[in-house]
Amino acid sequence: MSEHRATVTWKRTTPDFVYETYDRTHEVRYEGGIQHKASAAKEFAGKPEFANPEELFAGALASCHMLTFLAVAAKSRLTVDSYTDTPVAHLDKNATGKLAVTKTVLRPRVTFSKETPVTREKLVELHDKAHRNCFIANSVACEVITEIVD
């Protein structure tokens, strides 16, 4: 259907190349021209001021869920005024003992227009449909939990 590309660039900036000391800072560029610095998580000798792959994973999953949720709500003729999420990706050992994101918890907070009030049951239904149709959620092996925030 479509392809989506990014370019990741890293260059050694230290005199040595030793696991404990090499700089993990790199650049990620996207087709549209956006670019940002990234690093490893601080637990893996990265720089905490830059995004790390685990954070980017959580952000990508939450962004996809939100975009799918907004599409589902719009097609249901429900007006969303705001949407905020604070996703958490949990890094742990998986069933084979490898480090992996084993669970990601989404915590979306949705505000609907007063003209289109939504019951909690309808909200759960909308999030369930969004999850089932989210491209990223359909691509990952970890458990994805949506904790609806009122």
Image: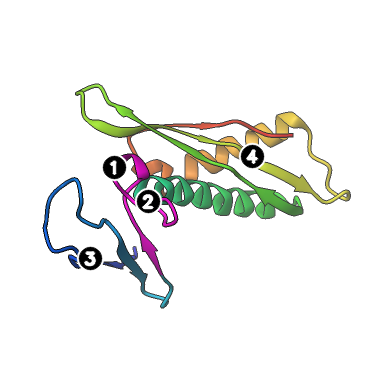
Give the residue number, with chain letter if any, for mark 3: 10
Residue 44 sits above or below residue 142 on the image: below
Of 75 and 37, the residue lying toward us: 37
Of 79 and 7, the residue lying toward us: 7
User: Hey, what amino acid is under mark 1?
Assistant: Phe
How dense is the environment of label 2, judged by Cα within 10 Å: few (below 14), some, or many (20 and up)?
many
Asked if the stretch drawn in magenta spans residue 48, the answer is yes
Q: Residue at x 19, y 23 (%)?
A: 96
Quadrant of the rendering where the N terminus is positioned: bottom left
Is tag 3's residue or tag 2's residue first in the polypeptide sequence? 3
User: Hey, what amino acid is under mark 3?
Assistant: Trp
Contact (CB < 8 A) between labels 1 and 2? Answer: yes
Contact (CB < 8 A) between labels 3 and 2? Answer: no
Dot 1: element? helix
- Is residue 18 in sight in this rendering? yes
User: Hey, what amino acid is under mark 2?
Assistant: Asn
Give the residue number, with chain letter if any, for mark 2: 52
Asked if the stretch drawn in magenta spans residue 77, the answer is no
Q: In the image, which is nearer the foreground, mark 1 or mark 3?
A: 1
Q: Position of residue 90 (x, y in %)?
A: 41, 32
Dot 3: element? loop
- Which residue is outermost to the bottom? 33
Snapshot quadrant of residue 37: bottom left
Give the residue number, with chain letter if any, for mark 4: 126
Give the residue number, with chain letter if any, for mark 1: 44
* Magenta stretch in the rendered image: 36-51
Q: Report whether 131 appears left or right of 3.
A: right
Dot 2: element? loop
Q: In the image, which is nearer the foreground, mark 1 or mark 2?
A: 1
Is tag 1's residue or tag 4's residue first in the polypeptide sequence? 1
Contact (CB < 8 A) between labels 2 and 4? Answer: no
Is tag 1's residue or tag 3's residue first in the polypeptide sequence? 3
